[in-house]
Image (tube, coloured by chain):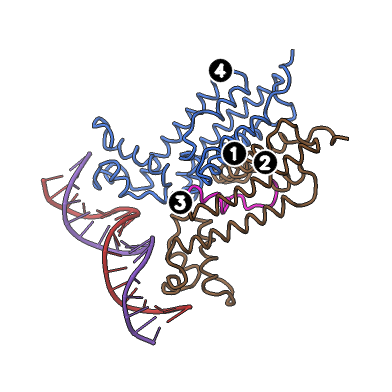
Chain colours: A brown, B blue, C purple, D red
Amino acid sequence: MYSERMSTSERLIESTRELLWERGYVGTSPKAILERSGAGQGSMYHHFKGKPDLALAAIRRTAEELGATAEAVLTGPGTPYDRITAYLTRERDVLRGCPVGRLTMDPDIVANDELRAPVDETLDRIRELIAAIVEEGKEQGQFAPSLDGAEIAATVLATVQGGYVLARASGSPAAFDAGVRGLLSLLEPRGTPHP
Amino acid sequence: MYSERMSTSERLIESTRELLWERGYVGTSPKAILERSGAGQGSMYHHFKGKPDLALAAIRRTAEELGATAEAVLTGPGTPYDRITAYLTRERDVLRGCPVGRLTMDPDIVANDELRAPVDETLDRIRELIAAIVEEGKEQGQFAPSLDGAEIAATVLATVQGGYVLARASGSPAAFDAGVRGLLSLLEPRGTPHP
DNA sequence: GTCTATATGGAGATAGAC
DNA sequence: GTCTATCTCCATATAGAC
């Protein structure tokens, strides 16, 4: 399943990341991880204390990766509106859902502070980035002064996370795209930047 | 657990609804359902063909109930903006998440058209109600003519569904509320209705 | 309709040999 | 580090008595 070059430990983590994305924590069994990674029972319990320990390594990596991707897009070129547009319209495998956000629907993740922490921190990090961008847009006169950066950031992030829900419910990415377009139409900059 | 008056079949459905909300489909076992409902193994398989069959009955009921609740709020009194505000700010047990939306993160639900159908139909029904309200608001001059009813409806629904994700990630309803306030600030009506 | 018995396989892990 | 054996529950039923 993976390059011969990848260590057993790496293969275990990568397989777990995939399965957590596809099936969530509750739906992912050690057995499935072993089959996908090609590792044996003994290897898994040698490298990790158990399912929660392995899941934690996988979740941390996925969270870090998503945070970095979002940050790259949000700190790219363009006006505040451009950067938010870039974030909202970046390429996504919509029907797969968000590998981080989906974990919040997993009871065992939400019940475990250690497992939930990377999820919380990542969404929070993205929210702060967007909030700062909105504030910047307000200073430049691109956004109405009445808007609250932190609130709009929550709206943007929620639209994305909820877009996945609508898309998966209907079996089509169309609803995700519609939600994003609706939000962008509401955010549309007013007139020209201040002189 | 339930009134003596409730039939065994009813108790099974109600227990299943609760468990699906708390733990999702994958995380809900027949055994847990039996324990919560107080029914025996034999009763369950007498009334239902198996876990998917019982889950279907539970999901249909939850979906119908949520659709009716949303419809009641959205067809209430007030201007289009008022009614969307009412929908967005209606009382919710935010940290429990949406009993319908959460099912979209369940791989076995999304993979089964019959189980997914009530979820899809319910979200679609709400979306259409909101879309019509937005169009009504446009006619009344409360919303900009440039807005697209169907798109804004997707944004509104996504903000709610995504709000649950943010709230559960952080363990606090604050993010849900922030997202809703952000969206309402963007939707804020312009000036007075046309003459 | 409900109960108890029985069954197969999976979940999640430990033990100890190699 | 990895492998195989073994273990205890649980998941998800079916069978047949009452």
Q: Amino acid at mark 4?
A: Pro
Q: Residue at x 58, y 51 (%)?
A: A121
Q: Which residue bears the numbered disc 3? A: B108
Mark 3: which amino acid?
Asp
Q: CA distance from mark 3 to mark 1?
A: 22 Å
Q: Which residue is mark 4?
A: B77
3 vs 4, front mark: 4
> Which amino acid does the dot numbered 1 rest on?
Ala
Residue in view at x 70 percent, y 47 percent: A89
Which label sits on residue A174?
A: none
Q: Inspect the magenta stretch and tell me whether residue B84 lies in it.
A: no
Instruction: Report the chain holding disc 1.
Output: B
Badge 3 and badge 4 in a common chain: yes
Residue in the picture at 49% in, 29% down: B91
Q: Which residues are magenta?
A: A88-112
A7 lies left or right of B29: right
| Quadrant location, the N terminus of chain B | top left
> Which residue is label 2 attached to?
A180
> Within 10 Å of the Cα at label 1, are there few (<14), some (14-19), or many (20+) other Cα atoms?
many
Q: Nearer the viewer, residue B190 or C7?
A: B190
Q: CA distance from mark 4 to mark 1?
A: 23 Å
Q: Residue A63, image x and y in percent?
A: 58, 56
Confirm or deny contact between disc 1 and disc 2 (CB under 8 A): no
Q: CA distance from mark 2 to mark 4?
A: 29 Å
Quadrant of the snapshot with the C terminus of chain B:
top right
Q: Determine which residue is flagged by label 1.
A: B158
